[in-house]
Amino acid sequence: MTASEFETTDGSRIGTSERTGQVFEIQRFSIHDGPGIRTTVFLKGCPLRCLWCHNPESIDPRPLLSFVADKCINCGACAEVCPNQAHVMDESLGHVFLRKKCDAVGACADVCPSKALEIVGRAMSHEEVLERVLRDVPFYEASGGGVTFSGGEPLLQVDFAEALLRDVKAAGVHTAVETAGHVMFDRLERVVPYTDLFLFDVKETDDSLHQKFTGVSGDRIRENLVKLHDTGASILMRMPIVPGLNDREEHFLEVARFVAPLTDLLGVEVMPYHSLGLSKRDRLGLDLEDGTESSPPSNEKIVEWVSLLRGEGVNVVNEVPQGI
């Protein structure tokens, strides 16, 4: 058994191993994280702080408490069991949640009848995850699907991810890894033998803007993509595009220049911004900078982006919206 640690958002450390990892969701019947019908395993922990993050619950590897005030029926059950008095039932204000007192033990979520309180993320064993993802083998076989490991950044928990990929692959199931690429290359290299498809994000080509948008340099990400390509791995490069931030013509042209030598890429997928992450921030009490007031782009704008890339010789795999 191997084990490793990685940092939380406050600098403390979380341990993971081949046998145990931090998971925040296992999504069955997914159709957006690789070919066919898939199960996507979302692992917690991410080194990036993207302004547009749509899975903000993934950033911190520790469990978080979600509170949806509109679901609360003010029964007071949470206040009775919370060891830290983080829940206060006020006659005029109703349920007041003092998040700074919360250590996400989860006793309150266990007794909440309306599910206004829920723990997001928990330690799961290798055996538990493997049993869950192999339940749907008939659907994978019928649709050409499989299992995708995502996050967060799944390769922060590389021991856990590698062990699961190895065993899923050994079961004859197609495997995919969704990565932002900001890890030491040896972590990518370790999972290459067990990964049928890498979904590799390139979020920005101007490094000063990459640091502004994500909190880290993009140099390692681009270097890792080239190195991964040179291993012969199957890679679909993905471009998250956020109106008003990285939808610049210069970015698209630089992507075209960057991918031109990467002749074995399966293609490039344009991923238009959506705003689902904003409501998650509210219910998790995450004080993250929201660098955009963008709305999801129109179909016309998506066609414009795809056409620009294809005009530069990029193999864009998007199905362009029809009838516009």
Image (cartoon, grey):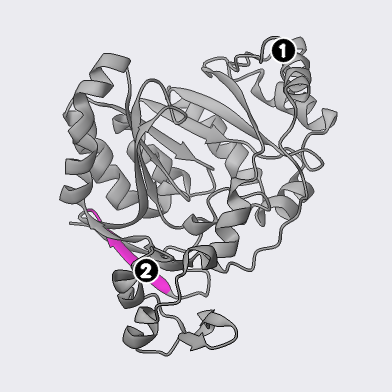
Q: Which residues are magenta?
A: 13-18
Q: Is residue 100 above or below residue 271?
A: below
Q: Quadrant of residue 112?
A: bottom left
Is 74 rendered above or below residue 126?
below
As for residue 17 lying within the magenta part, the answer is: yes
Q: Nearer the viewer, residue 233 or 40?
A: 40
Magenta stretch: dominant SS?
A: strand
Q: Which mark is residue 95?
A: none
Give coordinates of residue 43: x percent, y percent.
39, 51
Whether 160 is drawn above or below 65: the answer is above
- Residue underneath mark 1: 310
Horizontal arrangement in the rendering, residue 300 relative to residue 271 (left or right): right
Between 104 and 144, the one lying in front of the other is 104
Residue 183 in the figure: left or right of residue 38? right
Rendering coords of residue 224 (x, y %): 54, 38
Of mark 2 and mark 1, the one earlier in the sequence is: 2
Residue 164 position in % (x across, y down): 25, 42
Q: Provide residue 256's location: percent of width, then percent of height.
A: 72, 21
The amino acid type found where label 2 is placed reads Ile
Q: According to the image, label 2 marks what residue?
A: 14
Residue 60 in view here: yes
Q: Amino acid at mark 1?
A: Arg
User: Residue 171 lies in what quarter of the image?
Assistant: top left
